[in-house]
Image: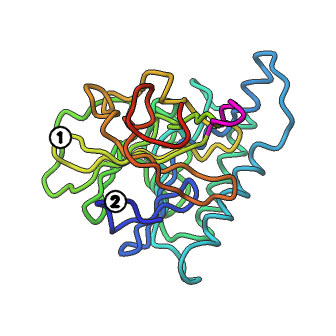
């Protein structure tokens, strides 16, 4: 699926692919997620890292050709738990980076609010792994999205963020059941295209933006309502549902309604 007004990128499952730069962007992996839930008393089955790697493999398999990627950008929140690394999260991060470096010449880790100050240790002994607070390539500017930028650099055509874990809950008009789908959002922010990526974390769907307030300050002040919605089907197909405002209660859209 090629999103409207952004022909230079492709949405592939939870990934954003830039063909001209052979760059794949992912967001919100949240390694160590299951360990944190266990420590908080919530029992979930083991296998979060395996599910993440299976999702990554599916995205890479869908890319054009078999040539090595130029880079993978992880746009924030590689890890879940705040504070020092735990042994399990550290092992998971090393294995995840091994897989990324097997398919790309360069890995760029953009710091998210869960990562602050903890990613340098991962990169210091790995050639080709960079840690950045922001990263630009081919007119795209990757920032995590937990803070509003003080300024947008010249030459930026589109801002790409994570952080939000966007999803929409749609009610079947026949059964009345609400199904929640991860989604991409495409809107406008300070005169540029804004793209919001869904979380790569396969065990959470995200925040239902038809019922919850946005987390990212970049989606405040009417930006969210003007975004177009691109939900992910169960098989990874990216669909187009038009403007979010049409799905909100009282909207003018037809078909499934929140």
Q: Determine which residue is flagged by label 1.
A: 190
Dominant secondary structure of the residues highlighted in magenta in the image: loop
Give how far across and how far down residue 228 sits, in percent: 38, 46
Q: Nearer the viewer's eye, disc 1 or disc 2?
A: 2
Q: Determine which residue is flagged by label 2.
A: 4
> Does 258 sit above or below residue 242?
above
Distance from the alpha carbon under mark 1 to that under mark 2: 18 Å
Q: Which quarter of the picture shows residue 35? A: top right
Q: Which quarter of the picture shows residue 162? A: top left
Q: Which residue is drawn at 40% across and 48% down?
A: 242
| Residue toward you, 226 or 11 | 226
Q: Which residue is drawn at 47% across and 51% down?
A: 230
| Residue toward you, 111 or 90 | 111
In the rendered image, residue 174 lying in the magenta stretch gets the answer yes
Q: Return the disc, 1 or 2, that comes first in the chain's sequence.
A: 2
| Residue toward you, 111 or 222 | 222
Q: Is mark 1 on a helix, strand or loop?
A: loop
> Does 191 sit above or below residue 83?
below
Q: Is mark 2 on a helix, strand or loop?
A: loop
First to last magenta residue range: 173-180
21 relative position to 121: left or right: left
| Circle count | 2
In the rendered image, residue 33 lying in the magenta stretch gets the answer no
76 relative position to 160: left or right: right
Give how far across and how far down residue 102 sits, in percent: 63, 69
Q: Which quarter of the picture shows residue 177? A: top right
Give how far across and how far down residue 157 sits, in percent: 22, 56
Give how far across and how far down residue 26 sits, in percent: 51, 52
Query: For mark 2, does the 10 Å Cα neighbourhood hold few (<14), some (14 to 19), or many (20 or more) residues?
Result: few
Query: For mark 1, does the 10 Å Cα neighbourhood hold few (<14), some (14 to 19), or many (20 or more) residues?
Result: few
- Mark sitting on residue 244: none
């Amino acid at each position: 699926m090629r999103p409207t007004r952004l022909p230079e990128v492709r949405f592939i499952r939870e990934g954003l692919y830039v063909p001209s730069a052979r760059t794949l962007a992912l967001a919100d992996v949240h390694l160590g997620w299951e360990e944190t839930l266990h420590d908080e008393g919530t029992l979930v089955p083991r296998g979060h890292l395996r599910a993440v790697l299976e999702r990554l493999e599916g995205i890479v398999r869908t890319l054009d050709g078999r040539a090595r990627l130029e880079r993978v950008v992880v746009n924030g929140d590689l890890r879940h738990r705040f504070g020092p690394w735990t042994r399990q999260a550290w092992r998971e991060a090393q294995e995840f980076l091994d897989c990324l470096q097997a398919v790309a010449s360069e890995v760029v880790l953009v710091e998210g609010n869960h990562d602050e100050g903890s990613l340098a240790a991962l990169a210091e002994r790995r050639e080709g792994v960079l840690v950045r607070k922001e990263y630009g390539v081919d007119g795209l500017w990757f920032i995590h999205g937990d803070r509003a930028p003080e300024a947008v650099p010249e030459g930026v055509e589109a801002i790409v963020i994570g952080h939000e874990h966007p999803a929409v809950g749609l009610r079947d008009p026949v059964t009345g059941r609400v199904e929640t789908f991860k989604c991409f959002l495409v809107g406008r922010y300070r005169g540029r295209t804004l793209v919001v990526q869904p979380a790569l974390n396969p065990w959470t769907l995200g925040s239902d933006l038809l019922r919850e307030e946005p987390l990212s300050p970049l989606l405040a002040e009417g930006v969210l309502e003007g975004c177009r919605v691109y939900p992910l089907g169960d098989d990874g197909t990216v669909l187009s549902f038009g403007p979010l405002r049409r799905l909100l209660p009282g909207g003018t859209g037809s078909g499934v309604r929140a």
